[in-house]
């Protein structure tokens, strides 16, 4: 593996690993470690704290001094099951100026460019160091970012700037919403539905919490947005339930109801405030349940907590990316990234990568060749800036 692979060849290799979040990413991590090592670059592995089938990898090239630029990406992808793909999702297929494959856009396209840039920086002998950070479990709430950052800080001199390569069409995104997610378990009491007043239907009481979430969405959307958040789409915080399970039969009050309740919060809005509001509503509904059958309950378990990215005054990351791209427009997005964790850890942070977020998670996901080439030109300019 001593050959210096092209970004395209690296992308093809990365996509060939089916690193769905529910499965292992270790074959990809093994390959990245071996490829970097073959070029004299020491890669460091951070194992998942509880899942031995997952790990993150990070590396540093250039002088052992502070002030590095971090190229941040994630290795996991979303599932393909049930999606009508017209190509093999784990093979890069080029058609009509597009590179099809799971993760080409979100975000192995950037990962490939970052790996290529780190190897090129090693041979160029940069004076400003580059760091590579590839995480696990981004797609299930960015839960792998914080431990990765902690490991990097213990191993390397502190970097200054982080470029998170989520797809932005190579625009400089300086703000995004934060998020928090809960798994909700409503425990009811089963009786025949003809006597439903003597039982506790977990689904129907869970529906009260879901209805409250809808009420909060209506209230939030009715408010006039402040100028600082007017560019978000939508310019308000949202509550969402995407999955729900429960019940045994149509004529039995449901013993269990389980669903995920997630929040996307505008920068500046307190997650703690929303958690307190939610717990107060849960306590109200739970009291109604227990008035019928003591021992019934609602349990909320936090699944993830993701800080938002707040636009920085005179941010070094924003300034660098704008200088390299020529992009002077203002961009914010409503999806979350690992950038919030980096910014919270004291790094100047910007989101900038090839591709359109509209392609992420879709069947026949693709990254246009033009965007991939734009990403490589960006990396070439970054290397020049670091020499």
Image (spheres, rainbow, N blue to C red):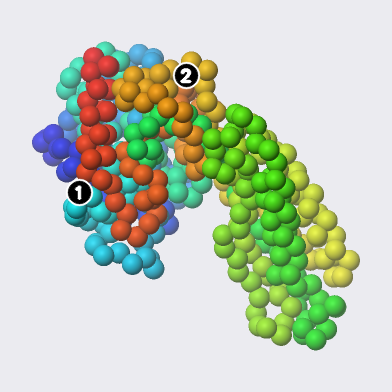
Q: Is residue 290 left or right of residue 367?
A: right
Q: Horizontal and vertical percent for residue 135?
A: 40, 40
User: Is 224 in front, or is 218?
Assistant: 224
In the rendered picture of this protein, how many numbered marks are placed on residues? Answer: 2
Furthest toward the left, the residue is: 3
Q: Give the labeled residue for mark 2.
A: 315
Q: Are marks 2 and 1 in contact (CB under 8 Å)?
A: no
- Front residue of this view, candidates 324 and 33: 324
- Is 369 situated above or below 17? above
Position of residue 3 in the picture relative to residue 113 (left or right): left
Front tag of 2 and 1 = 1
Q: Secondary structure at mark 1?
A: loop
Query: Which residue is pictured at 45% across the width and 45% down the height?
Result: 138
**Depth order, front residue of 295/106:** 106
Structural distance between the alpha carbons of marks 2 and 1: 35 Å
Check disc 1 and report the residue beneath it.
97
Q: Which mark is residue 345?
A: none
Q: Nearer the viewer, residue 326 or 193?
A: 326
Q: Residue 366, image x and y in percent?
A: 29, 51
Q: Residues within 10 Å of mark 2 (few under 14, many from 20)?
A: some
For the question of whether residue 233 can be seen, the reply is yes
Residue 356 picture quarter: top left
Give the position of the N terminus as an image quadrant: top left
Q: For the point 57% across and 63% down, which residue is it?
A: 243
Left-right relation of 95 to 235: left
């Amino acid at each position: 593996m001593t050959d210096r692979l092209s970004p395209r060849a690296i992308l093809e290799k990365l996509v060939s690993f089916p690193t769905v979040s529910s499965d292992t990413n270790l074959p990809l991590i093994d390959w990245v470690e071996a490829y970097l090592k073959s070029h004299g670059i020491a890669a460091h592995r951070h194992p998942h704290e509880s899942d031995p089938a997952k790990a993150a990898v990070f590396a540093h090239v250039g002088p052992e001094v502070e002030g590095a630029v971090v190229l941040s990406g994630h290795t996991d992808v979303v599932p393909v099951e049930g999606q009508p793909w017209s190509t093999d999702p784990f093979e890069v297929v080029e058609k009509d100026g597009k590179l099809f494959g799971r993760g080409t856009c979100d975000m192995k396209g950037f990962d490939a460019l970052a790996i290529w840039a780190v190897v090129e920086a090693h041979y160029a002998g940069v004076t400003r160091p580059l760091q590579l950070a590839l995480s696990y479990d981004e797609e299930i709430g960015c839960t792998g970012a914080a431990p990765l950052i902690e490991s990097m800080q213990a191993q390397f001199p502190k970097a200054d700037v982080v470029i998170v390569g989520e797809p932005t069409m190579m625009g400089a995104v300086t703000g995004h919403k934060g998020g928090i997610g809960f798994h909700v378990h409503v425990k009811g009491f089963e009786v025949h539905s003809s006597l439903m007043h003597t039982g506790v239907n977990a689904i129907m009481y869970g529906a009260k919490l879901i209805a409250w979430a809808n009420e909060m969405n209506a209230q939030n959307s009715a408010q006039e947005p402040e100028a600082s958040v007017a560019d978000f789409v939508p310019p308000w915080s949202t509550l969402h339930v995407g999955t729900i399970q429960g019940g045994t039969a149509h004529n039995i009050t449901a013993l269990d109801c389980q669903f995920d309740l997630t929040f996307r919060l505008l920068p500046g809005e307190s997650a703690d405030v929303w958690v307190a509001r939610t717990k107060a509503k849960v306590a109200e509904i739970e009291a109604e349940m227990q008035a019928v059958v003591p021992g019934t309950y609602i349990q909320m378990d936090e699944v993830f907590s993701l800080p938002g990215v707040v636009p920085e005054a005179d941010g070094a990351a924003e300034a660098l990316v704008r200088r390299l791209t020529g992009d002077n427009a203002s961009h914010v997005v409503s999806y979350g990234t690992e950038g919030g964790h980096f910014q919270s850890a004291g790094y100047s942070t910007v989101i900038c990568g090839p591709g359109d977020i509209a392609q992420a998670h879709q069947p026949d996901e693709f990254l246009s060749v033009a965007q991939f080439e734009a990403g490589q030109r960006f990396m070439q300019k970054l290397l020049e800036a670091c020499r």
